Every structure is written in C-alpha cells, then in structure tokens.
Amino acid sequence: MLSRLYSFAVCSLALVPVAVPARAGDMSSWSAPEGTAARLIAGGTQGDALLGGVEIRLPPGLKTYWRYPGDSGVPPHFDWSGSQNVEAVEVLWPAPARFDDGGSYSIGYKHDVVLPLRITPKDRAQPVELKLNLDFAVCGKICQPANAALDLALPPGGGAPSAALAQALARVPRPAPLGEKGEPGIATAELERQAETPAIRIVADVGNAATADLFVEGPNEDWALPLPVRETGPDGRTVFTLPVDGVPKGADVATAKLRFTLVDGDRAIQVDAPLSAH
C-alpha cells in the first residue's frame, strides 16, 4: 500500500510559533517579518458567509502542500478553536501542482499562495474574531515544520474586497458532474478488474493534454491513492490511470465516492462521484 511519508527533517532554521495581537481590519500582521510567513486576510461576503483567506509567503525554491500531499509531505492543519462567534470555517483550495521529489511525487504550491476561507458566523449581526493556529510544512532540499498563530477581527459585513483573494478564488476548482461535456471535463471514471491488479481509468477532455493533471482522493484521510499516469487514448482524449492501492482495510473502492480534481492550465474542476464498473 502506498504510504505517506510524514517524517521530515527539522533543522535549526525551522520556524518557531509567532503569536500576533488581535487586529481589526483587512489583514493581520505577518507571523514573521521575513522569509516564510503567514497572515489572515479579509474579503467581503458570500451569501450568509464571510470571506477571508490564509496567505502563505514562500521564498523562491520552496513549496508547501495541498490538502492531500501525495506520496510524501504533510498537509496544513488548521485549528480555529480559539475563534469567537464562529460556527464553521471551510478552507477552499486553489488548484495545486504535482512535484517530482525524486522517486516520489508530492502535491502543493511552489509560490506564494492564498487559501480562501468561507466563514459562517454564529450571529451575523455581531463581529467575528478569527484565531488560527496553523501548522504547515515548507520544503526545499529539506523540509521544515512551520507554525503561525494568527488573529483577525472581522466586522459583521466582512472586510473590504481583496484582489489577492479574488485571484485565489478564481483558481478554486469548479464543482462539475461526471460526464459533463466541455474542457476541462471528466467523461468517465471506471474500475477495471480484467488485469491482475485492478486499476482506475479516467477519461478526460482537456485543452492542453501535455500539461493537464489529475488528483484522486478517497472519502477521508485514511485513503492514500497513488497519483495517476497520463497518456493519450485511441480517440485522442486524455486518459489517466492508477492502480487500486492505498485503500483502507475494509473499504470498497467500487462503491466509495471519490473526489477527482482535474487541472487544465488556469482552469480546474472537481468531480465527486463513485466509479462505474467495467
């Protein structure tokens, strides 16, 4: 079974926790004055929810990880337990990229990134105080653990619109049904049992077959599905295949609802659907 490698080097350059005082406005202070740092930003409203974001600053050559980090890596961990007047916080993930780590692959971001937030207040008429304890990893040739303690007060109507947040929201994959026509689109996602090792075969329509990528996740964090291999099918469509590996004991890949994130240049979709048998 494919395993995630959760141990990583800790060196003297590892970031130490930095708490910043509560601040009302459009952004918190940076967690560190230079180098890798994080802050909270505000960004208006969406329906009954407030919008915000976690902005992570990465020095050149370093990367951090997506919600599913791939073969190796550590996903960010968000602790909102100290927040006030907060019912829920949903993290919205911009489309990530695949990185070749030499014998394994990871998934994440190799540039400054804003992770959008959808914040549901308990009382919409009252201000919200966001308190985040963020644990994440920053990797180059070695990996370093990082922690940031951030605090931002939001008025009942949310903060002012943010250009950086708007750009990040535009990169969040659009929900799409299986079989939707157009580019990008996932035509089929099938379980093939004929071979000695069962495999998942996904047929996609993309604009740039040379660079399009696909990431497949299980229903929860116990799943660790491998990254697919991309090829061109006989009909010219892009085909992604991956062996059935990394499935938790007792789980049935044939009936589970999987999440497919298809990235095609600046466009991306997310399809939540079970496999069809083949």
Image (cartoon, rainbow, N blue to C red):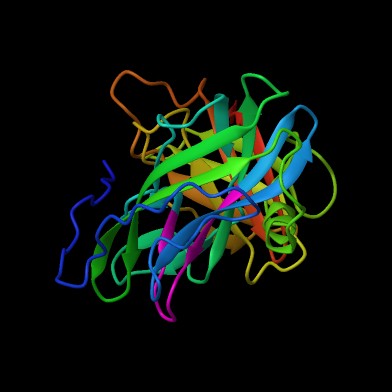
Point out the image quarter for the N terminus: top left
Please indicate whether residue 162 sits to the left or right of residue 90 in the image.
right
Q: Residue furthest bottom?
A: 60
Q: Report x, y in % for residue 85.
A: 56, 24
Please indicate whether residue 268 sits to the left or right of residue 57 in the image.
right
Instruction: Work out whether residue 84 or residue 181 is closer to the camera in this orientation and state it.
Output: 84
- Which residues make up the magenta segment? 53-65
Q: Report x, y in % for residue 36.
A: 39, 69
Instruction: Work out whether residue 240 or residue 273 is closer to the camera in this orientation and state it.
Output: 273
Residue at coordinates 64% horizontally, 51% vertically from top-left?
25
Regarding residue 273, the answer to whether it shows in the image is yes
Quarter-wise, where is residue 186 in the image? Answer: top right
Regarding residue 233, the answer to whether it shows in the image is no
> Is residue 64 shown in magenta?
yes
Vertical relation: 125 (above or below) 235: above
Instruction: Work out whether residue 130 or residue 51 is closer to the camera in this orientation and state it.
Output: 130
Point out the image quarter for the C terminus: top right
Vertical relation: 251 (above or below) 90: above
How many marks the image carries: the answer is 0
Q: Report x, y in % for residue 190.
A: 59, 35
Residue at coordinates 33% horizontally, 38% vertically from top-left?
246
Vertical relation: 154 (above or below) 143: above
Residue at coordinates 52% horizontally, 71% vertically from top-left?
111
Q: Report x, y in % for residue 105.
A: 37, 62
> Is residue 222 shown in magenta?
no
Residue at coordinates 54% horizontally, 46% vertically from top-left?
152
